[in-house]
Image: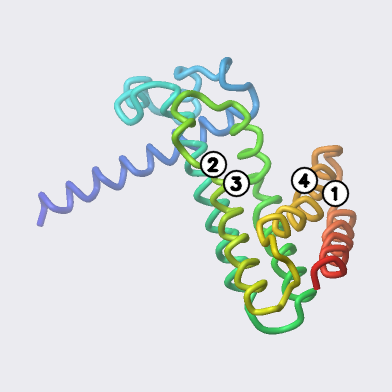
Amino acid sequence: MTSTSGTEGRRGRSIEKRRAMLQAARELFVKEGYELASVDAIAARANVSKRTVYDHFGDKETVFAAVLEELGEKLSATVQVALDREASATGDLRARLLGFARYFVMESFPSSDYAHYRRLSARRGSWYRDRESAISVAMELFVGRVEEWAEAGVINTDNPRRAAQHFVALTFQLAFEALERTETDVSGEVDEILVDGVDVFVRAYG
């Protein structure tokens, strides 16, 4: 029992250290950029030794990849939950699309996950070339739902992927740009953007 408890305790501490290092790295990469964020600074912010960072990740590029992967997983998970909760195959199309858009924005934007992913993914190292971006994965989830709606006659389109791209451009893209323009509260403007975007989409495809 003692040996098992000791092993579980060490594993738990290792998980906590990894979480702390990823959080520290994310903050530094976003604030200072990849080039200026050193392993020493990541270790200091996470309250671990530099050796611990190297033991867990190997090098800074791998730390960066892990940060981006974690953000990407959160983003994809949020899209999936939003689709499951709000974008069902029944009910009014406008209502379900607006519910989906509002849920995604409410969950992703305040947490900075979406903004941080966009900023960090702009720097793509060689490790990135053979990986799908999380935004692409999230998009595929939404495209799949739009394809289902097209097959069921819920929306009118012969090109579900293009329809999904139009929806994202009319809603999430414009909402993110509004948030980037100012540090003040623009929640009212963002919701107006989502409502207008959904209405345009429904008029075009409904």
Q: What amino acid is found at the position of numbered circle 3 in the picture?
A: Ile
Above or below, 146 relative to 3: below
- Tell me the SS state at disc 1: loop
Q: Measuring from the top left, give residue 81's x and y in whole percent.
A: 57, 66
Which mark sits nearer the N-terminus, 2 or 1? 2
- Give the residue displayed 66% in from the left and 73% down from the top: 149
Q: Measuring from the top left, give residue 20's x and y in whole percent.
A: 45, 37
Q: Measuring from the top left, give residue 11's x and y in whole percent.
A: 26, 45
Give the numbered dot on residue 133.
Answer: 2
Relative to the observer, which residue lies in front, 193 or 49?
193
Which mark sits nearer the N-terminus, 4 or 1? 4
- Give the residue displayed 62% in from the left and 67% down from the top: 147
Give the numbered dot on residue 185.
Answer: 1
- Give the residue displayed 60% in from the left and 32% down from the top: 120
Q: Which residue is mark 3?
A: 135
Q: Are marks 2 and 3 in contact (CB under 8 Å)?
A: yes
Q: What amino acid is found at the position of numbered circle 2 in the picture?
A: Ser
Of badges 4 and 1, nearer the viewer stands 4
Which mark sits nearer the N-terminus, 2 or 4? 2
Q: Quadrant of the C terminus?
A: bottom right
- Tell me the SS state at disc 3: helix
Relative to the observer, which residue lies in front, 161 or 44?
161
Label 3 Cα crowd, 10 Å radius (few <14 / some 14-19 / many 20+): some
Q: Measuring from the top left, give residue 168's x and y in whole percent.
A: 73, 54
Alpha carbon distance from label 2 to label 1: 29 Å
Q: Which residue is mark 4?
A: 176
- Tell me the SS state at disc 2: loop
Alpha carbon distance from label 2 to label 3: 5 Å
